[in-house]
Image (spheres, rainbow, N blue to C red):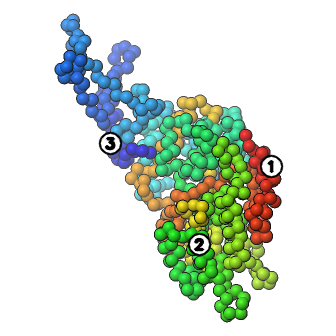
Amino acid sequence: MKNLKRFAAILIALCLVMGCAACSGSKGSGDQPATSAPDPGKTDPAPTKAPSGGDSAQTTPAATDAPVDTDVTPEPVVEKPDTKAYLDDEGIWRYTDTDEIVNLGGMLIELGQHFGGTETEPTTASEIARAEYLDYIQETYNFTFKEVKLGSFGVMQDVINDFCTTGGDENYVFCLDNAWITAPMNKGLFYDLATLDCLDFSEEKWDYSTSYKMKKGDAIYGMRAMAAEPRGGLWFNKRLMTELGVDPESLYDMQASGNWTWKEFEELCKKLTVDKDGDGIIDVYAMSSFSGEAMNTVCASNGAQIIDYDENGKFINATNTEAFMEAYDWFHNMRQLYELFPEGELDVDYTWDYSYGYFIDGKVPLNVSEEYHAATYKAEMADDFGFVVFPKGPKVDDYNGYSTDNAYIIPAIYDADRAWNIAFAYNLYTEPTPGYEDDDDWKTAYYPNFCDERAVDETLEILRDHQTACIYKLVPQVNNNNNYWWNIDVETAAERYETMKDEIQMLIDAVQD
């Protein structure tokens, strides 16, 4: 959150504020509240010039019958931002109209999910600091925030839809899988978060791809206050690459320089596809890939989508766009030239997942697949491996991964004040821990699954920050089980478009509002 001070400074300021308030906060014999204590973090405005031309500081008239000098210029009004609350100089949220500290009245706000909900004792310095920060915000603004598991994946969609329709006493932020978003959003069951001034989606913590996929006109119906999960990229076997005359570190170096492109990938595959004995038969193919997984990565690398939005925010079939067809046909050709496919008895030990087995067993130096394979590769491979982002295509200026991450919503059934309070609490709850804003603690869980730190420090860093939302995930059954990619090796992009266009349009029409 902008202007949020270090935790220690905030605590000190709060003590000063509350201490001053305690000294002057008692009421008199009447029903009128006592005057609020001055904010210790502010200074009195400089006196202004009186109409008579002399400089005169404002004074309080004595309690006598003497006439009051009506020429004294009143103290100028300090304009507050046009918001329900503002962040003062000491990092404290105050109501704009009263300057009182925001008070949520003891509300319990729950983050309803289909996972998690188990609390653990903090042990590391960052976890302890996090716990202290959460205690501070809940005590300061008088609320409680909990993460709760409301049901399994199979029932959670109904739980969310039922509550968003009928409401209840609970104050929820819900976590939604992509497939649960479109129908209730079209029915107006999600609150327009863009109307809540306590949320600023220009702040770094908000995932842009989530805001993009859940935006209609000026309205934003979903949010994600965390980095995207790193997904597709390119794995490489360091031993095989070295034996074939390619320095494995050169891939990291090209990635770091920004020169890692489709063209460089083509040149790499040429070097790694080898006829060792000169008999005209390829002995080593450069890569393996499971098309249903790899094509999400390849399309994202060229800024392409299966489903996208038009200028009116409506779903459209984007498989006939230049960026999509270029990515499809390019990777179709790359697979024909450089992919190791199963062939008879050679692959008797493999099933549908042969592309992963080939890489694990050291039969190919390159593998296009997602980051989550890291733990399996680390456990089962004899060779060291590396991991880089997929190279960028000609339609983009920078590396680009893809996102299918969960989104977070507030039910539209709440009134404006209740929604604002819930959003305010969620915003605070998702703030980086003061003192750890630039913390790399997230990397700790990834390091053990990789063979070098560059994969985490460089590649995963890029993938977390450069994501495009897979819009097709919002249209149920489109590319279900990756069916759009089933015939990538026998159909061109234009042919596949003709094969699938009617089915895709039918699915779009079924959910289009």
Q: Would you place residue 270 above or below residue 493 in this image?
A: below
From the viewer's perspective, tell me whether residue 79 is left or right of residue 68: right
Quadrant housing the C terminus: top right
Label 3 sits on a secondary structure element that is helix
How many other residues sit within 10 Å of disc 2, few (<14), some (14-19) or many (≥20)? some
Q: Would you place residue 75 above or below residue 490 in this image?
A: above
- The residue under label 1 is which amino acid type? Met
Which residue is label 1 attached to? 506
Quadrant housing the N terminus: top left
Which callout, 3 or 1, points at the residue further toward the start of the chain? Answer: 3
Q: Residue furthest front?
A: 322
From the viewer's perspective, tell me whether residue 480 is left or right of residue 386: right
Which callout, 3 or 2, points at the residue further toward the start of the chain? Answer: 3
Give the alpha-carbon distance from disc 3 to disc 1, as whole Å: 60 Å
Which callout, 2 or 1, points at the residue further toward the start of the chain? Answer: 2
Give the alpha-carbon distance from disc 3 to disc 2, as whole Å: 57 Å
The spot of residue 223 in percent (x, y) is 57, 46
Which residue is label 2 attached to? 263
- The residue under label 3 is which amino acid type? Ile
Which residue is label 3 attached to? 12
Give the alpha-carbon distance from disc 2 to disc 1, as whole Å: 37 Å
- The residue under label 2 is which amino acid type? Lys
Q: Residue at x 33, y 22 (%)?
A: 35
Q: Residue at x 64, y 74 (%)?
A: 367
